[in-house]
Amino acid sequence: DVDEYLEALDRVPVITQARLQKTIGFLSDFVGMLGELGLSFLQHEQKHSLMLESERRYRRLFDNSAEGLIVFRVERGADGEVEDLVIADVNPIQAQRTKVHGERLVGWRLSEFDGSDERLHAYFDVVSGAVRAGRPARGTPRCTARTSSIAVPMDMRGLSDPNGSGKIICARS
């Protein structure tokens, strides 16, 4: 059956050495790309897991801190100047000190603050000054009520986010 064998060989596709090398090169590059994508995805998942763990630790520290903490989101205008501060988060101690539930404080804008709470107003003045100056501020905001005058000692620490998220954390001690 030599004739059948030769006929079968005629039906087998024949590729040149150059074509074979080109195909093997393509497959090699494709497999390499898939490997890089898989590694990139794995690294992304690892970073995501680390971020979630960091957020969990941050949240636990934030919520259980003995200090009153407020996280502000800084809003800047087209010129890069600070236009407003928006409360992004408040820990329970600070909510207790301001006598406003933390969830109600989130979203408040400094520009919309009515000034009815003089202690909070003094706090905002110190924070906005620190943000505008671009450095921590130490001060003693003073506020007066109808019946008395009180001084609220504060050590404001505005921590700029190195990743440029525009959030700062302020602590009142």
Image (cartoon, rainbow, N blue to C red):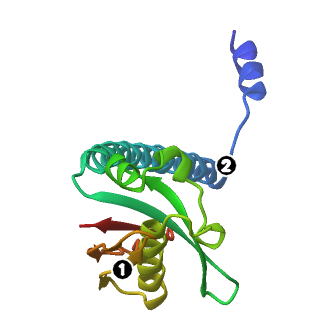
The image shows residue 47 at horizontal and vertical percentages of 37, 50
Comparing 155 with 99, the one in front is 99
Asked whether 153 or 58 is in front, the reply is 153
Q: Given the image, on which type of amino acid does mark 1 rest?
A: Pro
| Picture coordinates of residue 63, whole percent (x, y) | 31, 45
Q: Image height check: is 171 above or below 14?
A: below
Label 2: which residue?
16
Q: Which residue is drawn at the image coordinates 30% and 81% (left, top)?
A: 140
**For the point 61% across and 87% down, which residue is it?**
80
Helix, strand, or loop for circle 2?
loop
The percent position of residue 35, horizontal first and vertical second, equals 46, 45
Q: Residue at x 31, y 66 (%)?
A: 171
Q: Which residue is mark 1?
A: 141
Quadrant where the N terminus sits is top right
Q: Amino acid at mark 2?
A: Thr
**N-terminal of the two: label 1 or label 2?**
2
Nearest the viewer among 26 and 35 is 35
Label 1 crowd (10 A; few <14 / some 14-19 / many >=20): some
Q: Nearer the viewer, residue 126 or 88?
A: 126
Which quadrant would the C terminus be assigned to in this image?
bottom left
Where residue 133 appears, x then y in whole percent? Answer: 44, 90
**The quadrant where residue 163 appears:** bottom left
